[in-house]
């Protein structure tokens, strides 16, 4: 029987404390919940020669699926919180969700506050099989990082999704948590400490993300709950309206949804992501229409009014 992961802000805090006390890197071990044929943990070398091992959860597939979905999580960055979604993914899709550098089972032990370094480290996630298309999803704090990854790797990403994107401005709940975390920075567990450091230092770096978005020619989608009290939807909508992009950013408002869209039914989140996959219209050859000319009556027949007289 699957163990139900506790949800909510207080539950997330307790999960971090419990894991620190027990010496675990995972916050809801999937190894006890799903077989390796459904969800498995993998690791890879960070990009840029940084020398770190990065950990992630993925959906194994016997043959590559037409679309691969890469998820760059927020802060705290816990792939485990996507386990239910991973398990419900249809067979014609595959997904990999990462513990970003400094979180969960990923190295290093210290926080990496520079979003450019994070993007460089996570670049290997964008490898795809021959003929496979790739959707890149940046969740919350990961939205800015995913924007940099897409811009730095032209041709590798076919669709960019900014899911509950955090863009420097806090909502009432996140503001309270960051203020509290800064006062107790030396006492809270590593992952919560790193989240506070990242979130409080992101705003000066947003220019990099905005510049990256303006250079992208791929479809860009924002999926955001209209009840998000961590990252206000108004900030995301303003960014979409004010950023000069090559094609308009498509904003999807999710009614009554909060910041943690992966906390809801997996089917709802998967449907939202599926709506961001470009639909290829089949090409049909059509013969060109020839111009129509009005010819004088009787041009190729007998003259009007009867046969010619001898």
Image (spheres, grey):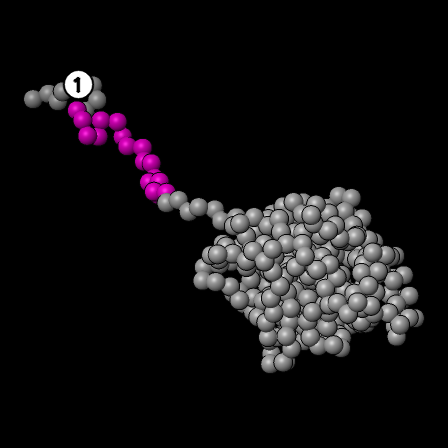
| Secondary structure type for disc 1 | loop
| Residue at the image position 67 percent from the left and 51 percent from the top | 84
Quarter holding the C terminus is: top left
> Does any portion of residue 75 appear in the rendered image?
no
Whole-percent x, y for residue 223 in the image: 69, 52
Please give the range of residues in magenta: 286-302
Q: Nearer the viewer, residue 26 or 282?
A: 26
Q: Nearer the viewer, residue 115 or 85?
A: 85
Residue at the outermost top position: 306
Mark 1: give few (<14), some (14-19) or many (20+) Cα within 10 Å. few
* 116 horizontally vs 229: left or right: left
| Residue at the image position 90 percent from the left and 61 percent from the top | 176
Report the magenta stretch's main SS.
loop
Image quadrant assignment for residue 203 = bottom right
* 269 horizontally vs 204: left or right: left
* 302 horizontally vs 187: left or right: left
Determine whether 65 is above or below 152 in the image: above
Residue occupied by mark 1: 306
Does 178 appear in magenta?
A: no
Q: Nearer the viewer, residue 211 or 192?
A: 192
| Residue at the image position 76 percent from the left and 77 percent from the top | 110
| Residue at the image position 63 percent from the left and 75 percent from the top | 53
Image quadrant assignment for residue 289 = top left
Whole-percent x, y for residue 162 in the image: 68, 58
Determine whether 186 is above or below 91 in the image: below
Whole-percent x, y for residue 285 in the image: 37, 45
> Does any portion of residue 306 appear in the rendered image?
yes
Q: How many marks are shown on the rendered structure?
A: 1
């Amino acid at each position: 029987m699957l163990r139900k992961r506790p949800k909510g802000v207080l539950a997330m805090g307790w999960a971090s404390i419990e894991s620190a006390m027990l010496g675990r890197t995972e916050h809801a071990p999937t190894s006890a919940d799903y077989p390796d044929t459904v969800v498995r943990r993998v690791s890879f070398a960070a990009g840029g020669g940084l020398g770190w091992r990065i950990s992630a959860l993925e959906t194994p597939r016997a043959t590559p699926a037409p679309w691969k979905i890469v998820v760059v999580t927020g802060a705290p960055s816990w792939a485990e919180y996507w386990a239910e979604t991973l398990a419900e993914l249809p067979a014609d899709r595959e997904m990999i969700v990462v513990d970003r550098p400094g979180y969960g089972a990923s190295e290093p032990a210290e926080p990496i506050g520079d979003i450019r370094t994070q993007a460089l480290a996570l670049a290997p996630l964008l490898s795809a099989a021959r003929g496979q298309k790739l959707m890149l999803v940046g969740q919350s704090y990961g939205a800015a990082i995913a924007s940099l990854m897409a811009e730095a790797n032209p041709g590798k990403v076919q669709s960019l999704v900014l899911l509950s994107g955090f863009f420097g401005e806090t909502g009432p709940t996140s503001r309270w948590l960051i203020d509290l975390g800064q006062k107790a920075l030396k006492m809270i567990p590593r992952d919560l400490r790193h989240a506070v450091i990242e979130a409080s230092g992101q705003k000066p770096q947003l220019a990099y993300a905005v510049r990256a978005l303006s250079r992208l020619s791929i479809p860009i989608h924002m999926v955001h709950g209209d009840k998000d009290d961590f990252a206000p939807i108004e900030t995301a909508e303003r960014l979409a309206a004010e950023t000069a992009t090559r094609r308009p950013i498509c904003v999807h408002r999710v009614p009554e949804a909060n910041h943690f869209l992966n906390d809801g039914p997996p089917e709802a989140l998967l449907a939202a992501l599926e709506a961001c996959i470009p639909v290829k219209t089949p090409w049909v050859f059509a013969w060109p229409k020839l111009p129509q000319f009005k010819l004088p009556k009787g041009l190729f027949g007998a003259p009007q009014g009867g046969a010619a007289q001898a």
